[in-house]
Structure formats: C-alpha cells, structure tokens
Amino acid sequence: MNNTELDIILILLKYKDVHVRGISKLLEQPHPTISRTLNKLKKSNIIDSKNIGRNKVYFLKKVIETKNYAYIAEHHKFLKLMDKYPEVGIISEKILSKTKENLIIIFGSYAKFIAKPTSDMDIYVETKNKKIKKLIEDINSKINVKIGKFDLSNLLIKEIIKDHIIIRGVECFYEKNNIFD
C-alpha cells in the first residue's frame, strides 16, 4: 500500500462520497494518477463507486479489508504529522509513557496541519481523571488537554472526528464512531 492509496482512504473516511476530480484537487496530484490508484483500490475490494448524474463517486466499502487499511491510514497520518512537526513525536512519546488511557487524540491546528510555532497542541484524552490532564499538560507548556467521555453528540467530539490525529486507540476511535457498522 503506497502513500497515495493511504491518502485516498483518509479522504474517503473524511468526506464519504468523492469524485476523482475532488480527490485530485485535495491531494494535488494529476487526475490520471488518482484514477489508476482508485482502480487499484477497487480491485483490492477496499472501495466501490456509483454514478450520480454524470459523475462517478467513490466510497469506502464496509468490509474488514477497508477497516484494516483505515487503521494503517491513521498511522500514516500520524507519521506525516511527525515528519512536518518533529516535536510532536517527542511530546507523544512522553504522553504515552505517562498514561495508559485508551484514547488519546491530537486535534485543532496540528491535526489540520496548519500549526504555527506559537500554536497550542490540543489533545483529547478519554478520561475523567483531572490528575491525568495535569500530568500531560506538565509535559510541555504548548499542550492544552481536554478530557471527558467520548460522546458523539458533544460539539468538541464532533470537531475531533472531523480533524484528528490518533496517538493511541485507533481501533477504539473507530468502534466509538461506528464507522464500519
């Protein structure tokens, strides 16, 4: 599985039904390259397509192969973030060593890949323990931690679902969102 394939899976996870032109624009890659990659993903039973008017739109199939590739795509996104912002890797390692919580997610400007040197790093941890919040915030002054139950009706959780980088708990995140049900 190459980077373009993983990037396409991430786009289809975020936008559901997308046409070739839209994917090409989002990835800033030529239309023929995207078409070839989509055909390969279709042959691999990961995506499917349907015609809406004169446009063919692509979507993820709800099968085990897609679920596993979605997990890989999430890890790929985390690696891209660490490549762009090396300090994220260092901070993430410290967070993982200090807490055993099941779901830890970066959101906000870092998750959107638009962080500036002065940006806070917004992190969500599924816990009610305020000591965990303090422990993580003490790692770096840039860290801003939100805690609480992962409730799909919560506005913060809706924002996190839209743009996120999962530090820990990829499978947990997908199960809570019922994405493949």
Image (tube, rainbow, N blue to C red):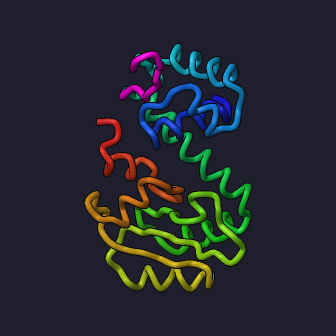
SS majority, magenta: strand
Residue sitting at x 60%, y 63%: 110
Tell me the quadrant of the picture where the N terminus can be found.
top right
Residue sitting at x 43%, y 60%: 160
Residue sitting at x 44%, y 53%: 162
- Say if 60 sits above or below 51 in the image: below
Residue 25 location, x and y as percent? 63, 36
Residue 119 location, x and y as percent? 63, 75
Taking the image as shown, residue 123 lies to the left or right of residue 110, namely: left
- Label count reads 0
Residue sitting at x 49%, y 55%: 163
- Residue 138 lies in what quarter of the image? bottom right
- Say if 39 sits above or below 23 in the image: above
Residue 63 or residue 94, whichever sits in front = 63
Residue 13 location, x and y as percent? 46, 39
- Say if 102 sits above or below 27 in the image: below
Q: Residue furthest front?
A: 53
Residue 89 location, x and y as percent? 67, 63
Taking the image as shown, residue 158 lies to the left or right of residue 141, namely: left
- Residue 33 lies in what quarter of the image? top right
- Residue 82 lies in what quarter of the image? bottom right
Residue 84 or residue 103, whichever sits in front = 84
**Magenta-span inclusion, residue 174:** no
Tell me the quadrant of the picture where the C terminus can be found.
top left
Taking the image as shown, residue 124 lies to the left or right of residue 138, namely: left
**Magenta-span inclusion, residue 55:** yes
What span is in magenta? 52-62
